[in-house]
Image: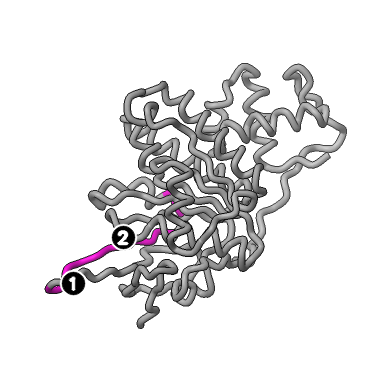
């Protein structure tokens, strides 16, 4: 009978009130609603929960003590980037990648996913919130990346009409979003996930509490699946990303400035989990094969 600390806390909540909704349990435990429901189903299958009556064995349920783990690295697939962060992104973490239009954020995501399965045997999922899957496939092909949809699931959770015109209740929209991400991960067996752009989803929630709650749950949901994920954010004002920047384990900023008649693009790593990363600004170029970063000191 395998029970972890989250299972034990979930059981304690149900002991107090078996009618506690999954959304409230998810909020308390910091996991997704889908994960709560999956865990409840597993506890039922184990015979621990029977019609929401707690059935304990003779031995007490004891959670395993927390232990330090070695930080594994996931290669980004972007030339020059991994040299800036000890060999790659920390495995099973979430990265907020933000920048202005035309900075190359989507291209970074393409390279992360495409080279993930081509070079490292790690399938992925692309959650498209702005451009259609067919448009993204076309864009990627112009950069020499013919995305194999059996290795990279490309799914759009909402129709353009829903995004632009409708404002469904946040619970329904959040559940639909989670369900779509879950299906995409299962469809490809994804180890890498890109959400492009996460700001489209978060913009549907007007109050700051709900926004904070959703970004926190998405982050924990992706990490609970063991995925290394990139959430792309449209850059308007740095203050727009306070919540996302605090919740994400890693934050990368792509920016550009004008020097005379030329536009200079630079990348900066603001933070990265358990990593002695570069603190500088690094020039990069968008080539016919994607991004190339100069790992200057």
Give the percent coordinates (x, y) of residue 111: 49, 62
* Rendered position, 24 above or below 8: above
Quadrant housing residue 38: top right
Quadrant housing residue 129: top left
Disc 1 to disc 2, C-alpha distance? 14 Å
Q: Which residues are magenta?
A: 247-260
Q: Across the whole image, how many numbered discs are drawn on residues?
A: 2
Q: Are marks 1 and 2 in contact (CB under 8 Å)?
A: no
Give the percent coordinates (x, y) of residue 66: 66, 54
Secondary element at tag 1 = strand
Q: Is residue 280 left or right of residue 21?
A: left
Q: Nearer the viewer, residue 81 or 102?
A: 102
The C terminus, quarter of image:
bottom left
Disc 1 crowd rating (10 Å Cα; few below 14, some 14-19, many 20+) is few
Tell me, for residue 262, which label it has, or none: 1
Give the residue at x 38% y 66%. 269
Q: Main secondary structure of the magenta part?
A: strand
Disc 2 crowd rating (10 Å Cα; few below 14, some 14-19, many 20+) is many
Give the percent coordinates (x, y) of residue 34: 60, 32
Q: Nearer the viewer, residue 111 or 99?
A: 111
Give the residue at x 39% y 38%. 212
Q: Which mark is first along the chain, 2 or 1? A: 2
Q: Nearer the viewer, mark 1 or mark 2?
A: 1
Give the percent coordinates (x, y) of residue 289: 44, 69
Give the residue at x 64% y 63%. 69
Q: In the current view of this chain or complex, which residue is farthest to the left?
A: 260
Q: In the current view of this chain or complex, which residue is farthest to the right?
A: 58
Tell me, for residue 103, which label it has, or none: 2
């Amino acid at each position: 009978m395998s029970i972890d600390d989250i299972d034990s806390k979930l059981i304690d909540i149900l002991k107090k009130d078996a009618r506690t909704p999954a959304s409230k349990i998810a909020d308390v435990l910091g996991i997704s609603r889908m994960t709560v429901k999956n865990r409840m189903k597993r506890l039922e299958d184990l015979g621990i929960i029977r019609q929401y009556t707690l059935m304990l064995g003779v031995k007490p349920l004891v959670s395993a003590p927390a232990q330090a783990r070695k930080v594994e690295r996931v290669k980004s697939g972007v030339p020059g980037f991994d040299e800036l962060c000890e060999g790659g992104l920390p495995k099973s973490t979430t990265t907020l990648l933000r920048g202005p239009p035309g900075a190359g954020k989507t291209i970074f995501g393409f390279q992360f996913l495409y080279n993930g399965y081509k070079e490292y045997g790690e399938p992925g999922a692309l959650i498209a919130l702005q451009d259609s899957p067919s448009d993204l496939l076309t864009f990627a092909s112009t950069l020499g990346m013919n995305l194999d949809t059996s290795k990279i699931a490309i799914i759009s959770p909402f129709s353009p009409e829903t995004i632009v015109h409708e404002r469904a209740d946040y619970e329904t929209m959040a559940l639909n979003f989670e369900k779509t991400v879950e299906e995409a991960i299962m469809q490809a067996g994804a180890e890498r996930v890109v959400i492009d752009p996460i700001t489209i989803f978060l913009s549907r929630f007007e109050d700051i509490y709900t926004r904070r709650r959703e970004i926190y749950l998405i982050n924990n949901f992706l990490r609970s699946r063991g995925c290394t994920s990139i959430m792309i954010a449209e850059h308007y004002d740095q203050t727009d990303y306070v919540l996302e920047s605090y919740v994400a384990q890693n934050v990368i900023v792509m920016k550009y400035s004008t020097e005379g008649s030329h536009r200079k693009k630079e990348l900066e790593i603001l933070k990265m989990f358990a990593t002695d990363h570069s603190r500088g600004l690094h020039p990069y170029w968008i080539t016919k094969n994607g991004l190339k970063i100069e790992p200057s000191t």
